[in-house]
Every structure is written in C-alpha cells, then in structure tokens.
Image (cartoon, rainbow, N blue to C red):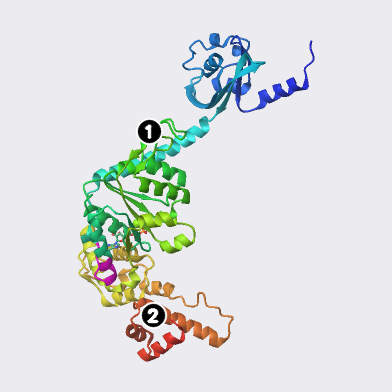
Amino acid sequence: MKEKTIDEILLKNILYSIDEGIHVIDNHGKTIIYNDAMAQLEGLEKEVVLNKKFTDVFPGLDEENSTLFTVMKTGRPILERTQTYLNYKGKKITTVNTTIPLFDKGKKIGAVEIAKDITKMQKLSEKLMDLQEELTNKNKESLKTTVPKYTFDSIIGNSDGIKKAINIARKSCNTSSSVLIYGETGVGKELFAQSIHYEGIRKNKPFIAQNCAALPESLLEGLLFGTAKGSFTGAIDRPGLFEQANGGTLLLDEINSMGINLQAKLLRVLQEGYIRKIGGLKNKPVDVRIIATTNEDPKKAIEDGQFRKDLYYRINVVSLVVPPLRDRKSDLELLCDSFIRKYNKKLKKDVWMISQDVIADFYDYSWPGNVRELESMIEGAMNYINYDENVLQKYHFPIFIDELREKDYNISKDIDLSESLPVVISNIEKKLIANAMMSWGNNVSKAAESLGIKRQTLQHKLRKYNL
Ligand SMILES: Nc1ncnc2c1ncn2[C@@H]1O[C@H](COP(=O)(O)OP(=O)(O)OP(=O)(O)O)[C@@H](O)[C@H]1O
Ligand SMILES: [Mg+2]
C-alpha cells in the first residue's frame, strides 16, 4: 500500500476535526470527501454518501437547489450563501455555504462545499427579532388605542417657567419642525411631546414613542428602520417605527443615550427624508416629525461626546426647556389640587385639600424626582387617608416629609470634617444658605426667614460665599 504523505495525513486530520462541514465531489459527481461535521449537519451517515454519485444520494437535487451542482456546471464559485433547510433527520438547519470549483492545470476536476452551521446564531437572532416585533406590536396596539392621553390641558402650572414652555410648544403645533425637549426626570417631557402631537396638524396620524436607552444599538436600529426579507438578522420583512409613524410623530426618548453610530444614521434619514431597511436595497420616503427628549443638558452631552453635534443642530429646531419643580415651586399647590382631584376619582375618596404645614414642607423640599415624585407622594397619602377624612395631613404621608427633608438636607455629606473648626463651620454655613436659596427659588427674604437671620445678614453672606 502506498505510504501516506504528511500533507495527506494533515489534510485528513484537519478535515475530520474542524467544525465546518466539508463535502468534495470529483469531476463525475462522486463524493470523495464527506467529513463528520457535514454528516452531522445533513443528518446522514458518512458511509451513505461517500464514494457514491451525489445525485443518487440526493435525488431531489438539481441546479436550482444545489450549490455543488451549480458550481460543477458553471465553474464559478458561490460565496457565503445562507441556506435554511430541513436535513434528512427533519431538523431545521441554517448554514452559510461557500462552494468553489477545483481546477488542476486549467481542467475542472471537482468541487468543494464548505458549510458553517449558524443554526444557533440564527435562532438567537430570531429570538431578538421576535422580541423586537413584540415591541413593535405593542406600539401598534397602543397606537390603535391611544386616544390622546395628554393635551395642553393636562399640563398643570402657572409659573413663568411652565408658561414659557407651553407657549413655545403651542406655537410648534402648526409646523412639522423637529423639537428637542430638555428637562430632568419627571418634569413632564412626555406630556409636552404628546400635547404637541395631539393638538398639532398631525393629530390624526400615529404618535409612536420609543425609548432610546432601553435597547442595544443594533436592535434599536432594526426597530427604527425595519429589516428586509433575507437580511442576515431575520427572514421576515419587518417595518420599522419610522414607517409605522409615517405622516405622524416619532418621539425619541432619551436621545442622548442612543449610540453614536446610530445617531449618524438617524441624521442621514432626517436629512434625506427616506429610510432603508437593514439588509434592504430600496429607499422608502418617510414623512415623520421628530420630537426628542434628553434629561441631560444637551450642551454637556455634546461635550462628553454622547450627543452628536450635527444631530443636535438638526433636531434642536424648536428648543423646549421644562424647568425642574424646585425652580417653580409656585406650581406646587396647583399640582397638589389637580392630583387630589385625580385620585379622589380613582380611589373614591373625598379629599378637599392638603394642610398648610404639609405644603410648607413641600416648599422646603428639592424634589429630585420632580412632578412624578410629587404625584406618587399624593397618591400614597390618598391611599392612606380614611374614607371619612377630608384633609391630607402630615401623618398621611407614609414617607414622612421630615424624613425627606433630613435626607435632602444631610449637610454633613460632602463636608470635610478634618479641616480646622472655622473652615468646617464656614462650609456648613455656605451649604445651609445654598440649600435655603434653592428651596425658596432664590427669594432672599423667604430664605432669610427660614434660616432665622435678617435679610441684610443673608445678603452679606451670599456675597461672602459668592453664591
Ligand atoms: N405639569 C404637569 N401637570 C400635571 N402632571 C404632570 C406635569 N408634569 C408631569 N406630570 C406627571 O408626572 C409624571 C411624569 O411626567 P412625564 O412622564 O411626562 O415625565 P418625563 O419628563 O418624560 O420623565 P422621564 O425623563 O423620567 O421620562 C406623569 O405621570 C405626568 O402625568
Ligand atoms: Mg419621559
């Protein structure tokens, strides 16, 4: 018997140990190599295939459905073709195949097929796509059922800050210009976005909201622009949110959390006015009004490299700033009244008012969670109050307001106690004054009163501490 060369031994070992399936046929269509990986993929025994004419083993195959067949005939390679089929054990398999003709001195001597099993990857990506579709459908459902949830009437407040924001928002109703809403969490950005849509010229068209922080970039891209049939990520044609919102408004919440690459793609769509699905070839024109929100100062987000400057300029056509509740404490009572009415109805209670000492504590608090926090607090107290009580008192608030104040005013926090006594005392004084000024919306008289010092003394200290 002829001794095997090192090349032959190496080749055999490689062929039978790698994960890729290898199938080689000779010039007559007879299988000369069929490795274990290929046998496993196709669900066949090696012996059934080896040394047989492959058209006898796979009688259903022809040029239409066999890449080996095609390559033998044309002499041209087929690279990286994705195939999904049921193998001989009835198992659904997805492979990426590369099939190349083999030549020796210009003469065709056979063909080799290399198949990579991507079934697991395919399943995973299908799962992701399903998830995506679920989200889209949820959006669709809410689309059908969304009778305007919020309009300008829902925005309670009489402070200058809120009045200014409402004024700008109302003016933008008659246009389709992009809007950027900036405000801390819970200030009412969603309220503004919906009001602009439902009181604007697009009110009879869809309003779709998507949070940009909730999904990884690649998924968000598919969700926004859609995916085309046959694209690697999934077999089904899926419309994106842009397509679904066509004619209407798309709210992109927390735009500053969107990946920087996707921001570039979004900018292109907004500039060119058409979308192209992932894996798709055709451009489709879309007409969508963009309202974006950010809870971080956009200028800072740009500085930090989180928000593309060019996208910012494209979106910040109408610029809306919703001030935090601590800067518009004059809205507190109106908001409390409105939430009391709301929860009277919901919880079947009969509350008429909130006591003045609770209101005073509310004035002292800095409301990091803004209106959302206030609403939850009132809802909590309205759960607590008895059916025969009519005034919300301190003891109805399960998290006692004093406690909140303590948390808020934890002045020893951030103060370096290892400094000399005069320095520590100055730092504490500075912090207390800064807190009082913030709580009273920079009203010097009120802040001085709450600190128990004269107005002039406070003014002197404000200058001293450069506040
Ligand atoms: N001016 C307001 N009048 C009445 N309710 C308000 C007002 N502002 C906010 N709310 C209520 O507070 C809650 C939070 O508002 P919204 O969801 O609009 O905040 P947001 O700014 O979008 O917050 P986030 O940044 O966390 O998404 C909602 O329940 C909303 O009804
Ligand atoms: Mg929001």
- Residue 48: x percent and y percent? 59, 12
Q: Quadrant of ligand 2?
A: bottom left
Q: Amino acid at mark 2?
A: Ala
What x and y, as percent, mark residue 347?
A: 24, 59
Residue under pointer 2: 436
Marking on residue 237 = 1
- Tell which tag, 1 or 2, sits nearer the viewer: 1
> What element does badge 2 sit on?
helix
Q: Residue 466 versus residue 268: which sits nearer the camera? A: 268
Tell me which segment is drawn in magenta. Answer: 155-164
Residue at the front extreme of this rendering: 106
> Which residue is at the front of the view, 180 or 92?
180
In the figure, residue 325 lies in which quadrant? bottom left
Please tell me which of labels 1 and 2 falls first in the chain: 1
- Who's the residue at 43% across and 76% down the image? 409
Q: Quadrant of residue 359?
A: bottom left
Residue 47 is situated, as x and y percent measured from the top left of the image, at 62, 13
